[in-house]
Image (cartoon, coloured by chain):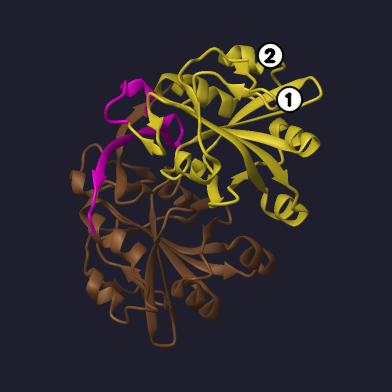
Chain colours: A yellow, B brown
């Protein structure tokens, strides 16, 4: 169990909003005793209800193997406070660095009843059950998941909406470009059109 | 031909960077004499080289029919100056509003040799050839395209990188949440990890 009192459950038909603004994500998975986390930019909502997501997982990654073995993965949204960890999780491989998570300073927790590791300090989490699609996985490295649980940090997401403008800037989502360069999410803007 | 002197070609293996930070996109297509544009949040890079993208196109949209008929579509990145137009392109349907593009104030242009309409005033454009995948299209509303041409506005993207910090804030990309609420892209942040 996790002791961050800011974690609040998000109703599944609104979980797409956690990804809709295009943040960089961390992908986590576990098989047997092996837990791993990688960074990914290519994750996207796929359906509102039942909630589904896509994520691209390269064949060179250990996390992909854990997803294929266990049939589960989580997507989570890291924040500016985690920029160094996010970059390192996307650079180091568990294949070469058996202590990858320790080196990256990544701490995991679990939600009751779900054997999928989640990363502490993120601002949103989506636990997903793999919908096996061998053609997409082999040909496109594309994995589809049904969202079975979703949570967010209520300092920045509550009642189905992000509130980045009012919160600590360190809680802003990250949007990766290339190299070591990210953008943070910016300001809320509205239209009545 | 188009007379915006800021449009510069982007090499295809770097075209993923136009989408990597997760902006809301406009999807355009043409079949016969019918041109249309819709807004979409669920677009994503799929492969570096050969460059590929995914986009989710609901069965209720006219644009989807045009993509299926022509085998081509374009993704383009609208900017803050276009927030009202972007919202309206995502709300009105050509099925009900035969003058949709005029109502939305959307002006189109074409690049030489490509019969795919592009939206003036955007900050990046990717012309894509549909890779037909009947299962993905029917079951998931998921369309995969090979990028055959890419361009960006060199006031905000040049030499393979975004430069939002130095540019007119009206040229910032939009990141849709729900209702009439978007976020703009924020500040560049770097890590040397």
Name the spot of residue B187 as percent of width and height, x first: 29, 32
Name the spot of residue A109 as percent of width and height, x first: 62, 18
Q: Quadrant of residue A42?
A: top right
Please say whether residue B1 is visible from this viewpoint. Answer: no
**Residue A184 forms part of the magenta stretch:** yes
**Residue A152 horizontal side relative to residue B85, left or right:** right
**Residue B187 horizontal side relative to residue B115, left or right:** left
Residue at (44, 55) in percent of width and height: B11
Q: Secondary structure at mark 1?
A: loop
Residue at (65, 17) in percent of width and height: A100
Q: Choose between A78 and A39: the one closer to the eye.
A: A78
Residue range in magenta is A164-193
Q: Quadrant of residue A146?
A: top right
**Residue B35 forms part of the magenta stretch:** no
Residue at (52, 60) in percent of width and height: B56
Residue beneath disc 1: A95
Please say whether residue A81 is visible from this viewpoint. Answer: yes
Residue beneath disc 2: A99
Q: Choose between A166 and B65: the one closer to the eye.
A: A166
Disc 2 to disc 1: CB gap under 8 Å:
no
Chain for disc number 2: A
Badge count: 2
């Amino acid at each position: 169990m996790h002791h961050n009192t800011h974690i609040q459950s998000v109703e599944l038909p609104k979980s797409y909003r956690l990804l809709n603004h295009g943040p960089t994500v961390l992908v986590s998975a576990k098989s047997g005793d092996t837990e791993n986390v990688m960074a990914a930019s290519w994750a996207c909502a796929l359906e509102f209800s039942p909630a589904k997501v896509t994520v691209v997982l390269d064949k060179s990654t250990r996390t992909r193997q854990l997803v294929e073995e266990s049939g589960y993965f989580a997507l989570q949204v890291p924040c500016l406070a985690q920029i160094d960890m996010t970059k390192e999780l996307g650079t180091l491989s568990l294949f070469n660095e058996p202590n990858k998570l320790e080196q990256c300073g990544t701490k995991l927790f679990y939600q009751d009843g779900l054997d999928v590791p989640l990363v502490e300090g993120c601002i949103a989490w989506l636990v997903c059950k793999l919908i096996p699609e061998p053609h997409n996985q082999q040909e496109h490295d594309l994995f589809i998941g049904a969202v079975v649980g979703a949570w967010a940090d209520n300092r920045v997401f509550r009642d189905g909406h992000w509130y980045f403008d009012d919160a600590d800037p360190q809680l802003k989502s990250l949007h990766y470009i290339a190299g070591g360069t990210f953008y943070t999410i910016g300001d809320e803007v509205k239209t009545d059109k």
